[in-house]
Image (cartoon, rainbow, N blue to C red):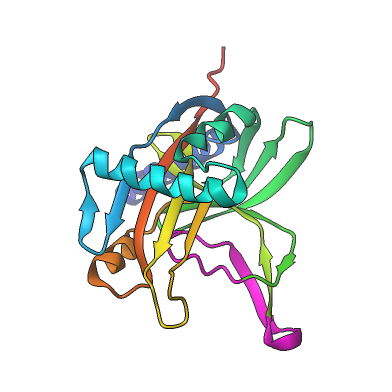
Amino acid sequence: MKTISLSVAMLACILCTTSCNNDESYPQTLQKASFVEGTTRMFTNKGEVFDTSIINGYIRRFQDDIYMIFKERPSLDDNIMEYNSCSYTITIVSKSQATILYNDGKKQTYKLQRQNGALYFVKDTLETTSFLFDKEWLKFKPIVVKTEPAILGSTKTSFNPTVFAYETNGEIQFPIVSCIVKNIPTINLSQGFSGWYLRQNNSISEEYLAKIASRTTAVDTIAFKESRIVFREIENK
């Protein structure tokens, strides 16, 4: 009986200690700490390109072509603009909830979900779009609630707006990616297609990069830069 009583007492002590430790870990308050600049990478149907002169030449020609039409030069170096503009405070309230206090004083509550190796900040509101989340080079997609037919054969998608992040060594890191893509010519698109997507809160899909080399995608070339905005916990003084 003494042995049983001792074991029960030890178990109760362990459970109490674990519970107390869990309670003490929240809330966690984090603020912007640093910006990690990514390197510019480029992939074609022959694999990754490492020659910086080829990469820079491709980007420069792309910028020149875009400038002739739109009078602007999309730059993969614009990720820093997101870092400069985000001075908000994050509070991890619990394992499943967080709040973000934005620069304008507005506080937004998010549900936390962990999937695809990332931390999802999910708004508890619905938005609707007629555009598909079909940019396959992006790793993460928002939480889609439902998809239904709309007029003229289009589709209406209802989704929860989602912010994507990584949990790394006690930090929360928000990925910011800018990229330019070029489609190979097809029967219906003889001249191909070029597009640019700047300062997206997302990561490049490794599966997608593998597709380029295996020629199972319509995109022939992609150049991108992925950076991280790092938030660290505020130390209690």
Q: Is residue 216 above or below residue 138?
A: below
The answer to whether residue 188 is left or right of residue 54 is right
Residue 112 falls within the magenta-colored stretch: no
| Whether residue 119 is visible | yes
Identify whether 56 is placed above or below 124: above
* Residue in the image at 48% along x and 37% along y: 172
As drawn, is 126 to the left or to the right of 229?
right
The quarter of the picture where residue 91 lies is top right
The residue drawn where x is 30% and y is 68% is 211
Q: Check if residue 133 falls in the magenta segment.
A: yes
Residue 131 locus on image (x, y percent): 64, 70
Q: Residue 6 or 234: which is nearer the viewer?
A: 234
Q: What percent of the width, then of the height, locates residue 31? A: 58, 27
Left/right of residue 199 with respect to residue 131 in the rendered view: left
Q: Position of residue 146 (x, y in %)?
A: 66, 77
From the top left corner, tell me how far across and down residue 18 is, in percent.
45, 41
Q: Which residues are magenta?
A: 132-154
Q: In which quadrant of the rendered view does residue 50 lie?
A: top left
